[in-house]
Amino acid sequence: MAVGENLKTVATNKKAFHDYFVEESIEAGIVLSGTEIKSIRLGGVNLKDAWCAVEEGEMLVKQMHISPYEKGNIFNKQPTRERKLLLHKREIMRLFGLVKQQQGLTLIPLSIYFKGSLVKVQLGVCRGKKLYDKRATAAKRDADRNIQRALKEQSR
C-alpha cells in the first residue's frame, strides 16, 4: 500500500478472527450495483456468515449481507445474493488449489473497505480453531490486558 492511500474500513468479520487462524490474506475487488455501493457507504454490510467458493473458474462470495438501500427503488438487489470477486485467474487457481489440497482450509472475507472510491474485500485463507485454541487466545488476551493495566498503574 502506498503512502497516503485513502482507506476507510466499513466492516470487519470479528467472528472469523475468533473461529479461525488466518494463514494468508489477499485483497480482491468486488462486483456491486449502484444501490449496494450506497448501502455500503452507510455501513449496511454484514460479513458474519460470509464465505467464498470457486465456481466455474470464478471466485464468489456467498452469504454476505448488504442491506437494501432505503432510498432505492426497483433496482435494489437481493441482500444475500452471490457476488463475484475480481481476482486474476492465477490467483483464483492458487487459492482453489490451497483449499482443495489441504484439509481444513477455507476462504473467509475478513473485511470490506474503500480504497479511494473502489470497494475492496480482504480475503483470508483460514484454518478452523478448536475449542482449546479459542480458550488459549482468550487467556492470552486477558493476560496482555492485565500487563498493560499494571504498566499503566506503575507509570502513574
Image (cartoon, rainbow, N blue to C red):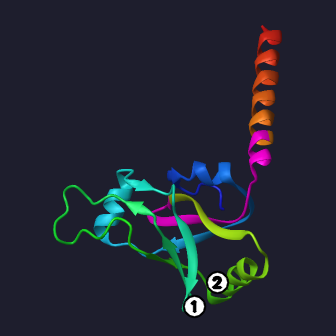
* Left or right relative to 140: residue 50: left
User: Could you say where residue 146 lies in the image, as x and y percent from the top left?
Assistant: 78, 22
Name the quarter where the C terminus is drawn. Answer: top right
Amino acid carrying mark 1 in the image: Gly
Residue ID for mark 1: 57
Residue 69 located within the stretch drawn in magenta = no
* Left or right relative to 150: residue 61: left
The label number, if any, that marks residue 92 in the structure image: 2
User: Could you say where residue 99 lies in the image, as x and y percent from the top left?
Assistant: 71, 77
**Which element type, helix, strand or loop, lies under badge 1?**
loop
Q: In the image, what residue occupies the spot 65% across and 61% down?
A: 2
Magenta span of residues: 114-135
User: Could you say where residue 77 lies in the image, as x and y percent from the top left?
Assistant: 28, 70
Q: Nearer the viewer, residue 23 or 131?
A: 131
Name the quarter where the N terminus is drawn. Answer: bottom right
Residue sitting farthest toward the left: 73
Q: Is residue 99 above or below residue 119?
A: below
Q: In the image, what residue occupies the spot 74% across and 45% down?
A: 134
Q: Quadrant of residue 127?
A: bottom right
Check disc 1: other Cα within 10 Å, few if <14, some if 14-19, many if 20+.
few
Residue sitting farthest toward the bottom: 56
User: Could you say where residue 75 lies in the image, as x and y percent from the top left?
Assistant: 21, 72
**Which element type, helix, strand or loop, lies under badge 2?**
helix
Q: In the image, what residue occupies the spot 59% across and 50% down?
A: 15
